[in-house]
Image (cartoon, rainbow, N blue to C red):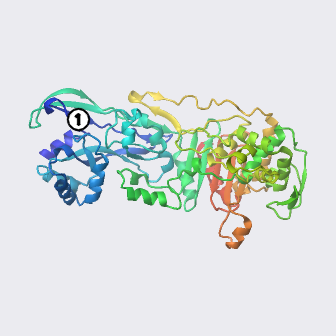
Amino acid sequence: AMFIWKMQVLDYNYFWQKAENNRLREIKLIPQRGLIVDREGKILAKNRASFKLSYIRENVKDRKQSLTRVAQLLSLDKQQLINRLEKYNSLPAFMPIVIKDDLTMEEVAKIESHQIEFPELRLEMEPLRDYPYGSFASHVLGYLQEISLDELRSPEFSGYDVGDMIGKTGIEYQYERDLVGRKGLIIEVVDSLGRKTGEVVQRSPTPGNKVFLTLDFDLQAKAEELLQGREGAIVVLDARNGEILALASYPNFDLNKFIHRFSPQEWTSLIQDQSHPLENRAIRGLYSPGSIFKLVMALAGLDSGRITTRKTFLCTGTTLIYGHPFSCWYEPGHGVVNLISAIQHSCNIYFYNVGRLLGIQTIADYARRCGLGHLTGIDLPGEKAGLVPDPEWKKKNRHEPWYPGETISVAIGQGPLLVTPLQVACLTSLIARRGRKTAPHLLLQVEKRGGVIEKPNSLASLDNDLVSAEEIFEKIITGMWRSVNAGGTGQGARLEGYDICGKTGSTQVISRSTADKLGGQVKTHSWFTGFASRDNPRIVVTVIVEHGGMGGQTAAPIARELFELYRRKYD
């Protein structure tokens, strides 16, 4: 009977509040955390019932003996138990400290049968987070961890208690306030033996809100499948409104391993993993853009009036600039090249010359106007801004002057220039929309109690659009269309009957001579970014595969599969 009573009453968290003559007992009722679902309502994060075991220091006469017995009862490491309790020494002794969570039914039965011998132990039910698809969208969803002592002391977390699980990364962190719900409360009047004699207050818990994401389950699953066994990232963006349909980073991690109050050893092994599975490469991975940056160069050249589409340069495979040889990726050379064919075939020589004409200050100015070197403002924590280098940056950070040869490297997306895959997706969207910016975001809507829907504040109202003549964008787009559809470097992304425009990139991770010495083991990073369709831009796909080799060979065919799935589903 005792066990059944506990099952009914302990559907929530309670702790003892020291009150006048110990006559009042406060019971906190833990709410269900809000669901996280995709754009079509498919559940990505839910809850399941579980038991946790807490230790109340106030009820202990001989702590050492008590801990020895508790460790034996539950086959726990005694030292870990001591460390756990010592962590909370500064808190009042009546507060229960969780010492084990997600107990098995065998463990629950064992504790029940020894309840009288262990007044210091309290068995409680709590809803535990459950991720039905394990590692699916792990970097987007994020995970929960136990609230820290510092957080408990901060006013931002008033209303939270010891042992509460809170969002630490991803959407779980970003929308913690929506997801957490509100605790219920019962204050009971008890006699000196702890028997209930009356009830003062009762408030039911309010479940958390349901958070709808812009993610499309099928596109996200496909993106993750295409990255399997590689290291890299994929962003699929709705060009019309900035909604993110897929944001994949690989390798990923199983979210269900994070539902427990972690031991430090488990943490260390994840953090030390050389493939960095916890890192969200889509918003935190910093890469050289390589030839993707030629899109910015083309825009800067045309908009500043330093070049026109009639301007040509001769590519013989190599050229001398400032007395130094610079080579094209295509050794035989592209011959006479204008802007459109330079984008189509990704000719280095053409863009070295554009770089020489523009100078680093103009290049840096346009790069920043295209959103590089700034945060995109996506609703996820931890985004990185990348780096747009210029003489001032170099002087401040490297205490050296800027050399003209460095401008030539930056002109083809090499040198200290660094971007995130999400920034590249936003740049692509900017070109697709002929200079109009969109704010990338993951929140579609929040469903509150009683079915009230709350949409995010007009995220798309971004100022500082690129006010350039539309025909400038049309020219760049023509080059991107030819890259995919007329035998250019992006032809691996071509889809019959679908006007995809795109640009490839391959970025040197180390110098070519070093790669040769290593027997060609170290391949370049492989980029592709593009949009469809040419005249009705709806979708942007950006792919980076680390050490994937040439962008046209690795990243472009991956993008093609995502365009194909999008067309099947939405067009």
Question: Residue 389, how many percent across, how many down?
Answer: 72, 46
Quarter occupied by residue 23: top left
Residue at the top extreme, as displayed: 200
**Does residue 65 lie above or below 143 as drawn?**
below
Q: Residue at x 30, y 54 (%)?
A: 83
What element does badge 1 sit on?
strand
Nearest the eye: 89 or 533 = 89
Q: Amino acid at mark 1?
A: Ile
- Residue 209 appears in the rendering: no
Q: Disc 1 designates what residue?
A: 27
Q: Residue at x 87, y 49 (%)?
A: 338
- On screen, residue 351 versus residue 120, left or right, reads right
- Residue 357 appears in the rendering: yes
Please count the marks in the image: 1
Question: Residue 467, how many percent across, how many down?
Answer: 76, 32
Quadrant of the rendering where the N terminus is positioned: top left
Quarter occupied by residue 306: top right
